[in-house]
Amino acid sequence: MPRLIGAHTIDIGGIPMAARRAGNAGMTALQIFSAIPKYYNEKAGVKPERVTAFHAALAEAGIARTAVIVHAGYVLNCATPDAEKWERAATALTKELERSTTLQVRGVCFHPGAATDNDRDAGVARVATAMTRALETVDGATKLLVENSAGAGNTIGRTVQEVAGILASLPPSLRARAGYGLDTCHLFASGYDISASENACIGVLDAFEQACGEPPSFLHLNDSLGTLGSNRDRHMLLGEGEIGIDAFRWLLGDPRTRDIPLLLETPQAIEMLAEDDASADPDDERMVALLRSFVAAP
């Protein structure tokens, strides 16, 4: 069965251009930012004409809205014990879900943040509280998705138990609108050796599914510059890092990778281009073709 393979493409010229670049690279999935990720964007909305243009570009590219993930801003820290910073992050997370719901995409993923007081259990609870507020405030089909972390410092979400703990802390009435996704670089950096063997790799998916009660809602497919357990969040092209190519072949062979966005966040050959240039990135094209070859292989 075909896989939904895509990437976080360059959005110079706006998110419609990101969709066109994805389509021109042969992608069937896409990740975008709904606002500039270096800011909280607590008040930023999405104008109707932007939604219309984005949907038209997706249709032109042959990408379903249900194959699109929005990545929340990097500055959000919903695990912080600082009340003022937490309030701002929780408000921004709610706004991320609102914008993503307006765009009618599958989900919005976010990094849980860091428990700077070193109280990991409290950090898990604070992330769940922020998610609860967002889900209670914004109604709709778009899901709010926790992304596992690489584990540097006091970042939350580096273990199966922490990701499952966040989701288990949500009110039962809201749980169906939440989920999680796994980043392969983060898994490896936090100590999950998905490169050791096929059984070990698939066993990681099994562990998360058993603890969380469901399979992942998306995968970020990234090789790792850092070694196993290094806690370094540095992405590499597939097969050019410490994970190696086999793990990605094993993952594409697992039935849980059907019908979910499989998204590259790997380095791209083109960093800047004109706003009206919808050219595909050569490295994105190469990585997409590589992943497709794993599905087509006997």
Image (cartoon, grey):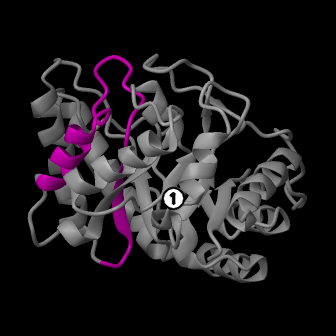
Q: Amino acid at mark 1?
A: Val
Q: Is residue 148 magenta?
A: yes
Relative to 119, does residue 212 appear above or below in the rendering? below
Residue that appears at 35% across and 61% down:
215
In the image: residue 10, left or right of residue 50:
right
> Which quadrant of the rendered structure holds the C terminus?
bottom right
Q: Is residue 47 left or right of residue 41?
A: right
Asked whether the viewer can see residue 40, the reply is no
Please state which of residues 45 and 78 is positioned toward the viewer in this rendering. 78
- Image quadrant in which you'd find residue 212: bottom left
> On the rendered image, what quadrant is the N terminus found in?
bottom right
Depicted 272 relative to depicted 55: above or below: above
In the image, residue 14 above or below residue 241: below
Residue occupying the point 80% across, 57% down:
289
Say if the magenta span includes residue 142: yes
Whole-percent x and y of residue 13?
77, 57
Residue at numbered disc 1: 70
**Residue 87 at x, y percent in the picture:** 22, 41
Q: Residue at x 30, y 42 (%)?
A: 89
Number of labels in the image equals: 1
Residue 136 placement (x, y as % from top left)? 18, 67
Q: Which stretch is magenta?
A: 140-168
Check disc 1 and report its element: helix, strand or loop. strand
Residue drawn at (42%, 53%) of the image: 109
Could you say which is closer to the camera, residue 252 or residue 217? 252
Nearest to the observer: residue 71 or residue 82: 71
Residue 288 locus on image (x, y percent): 76, 56
Query: On the rendered structure, is 58 left or right of 140?
Result: right
Q: Is residue 273 left or right of residue 98?
A: right
Image: 270 above or below 45: above
Whether residue 93 appears in this view of the structure is: yes
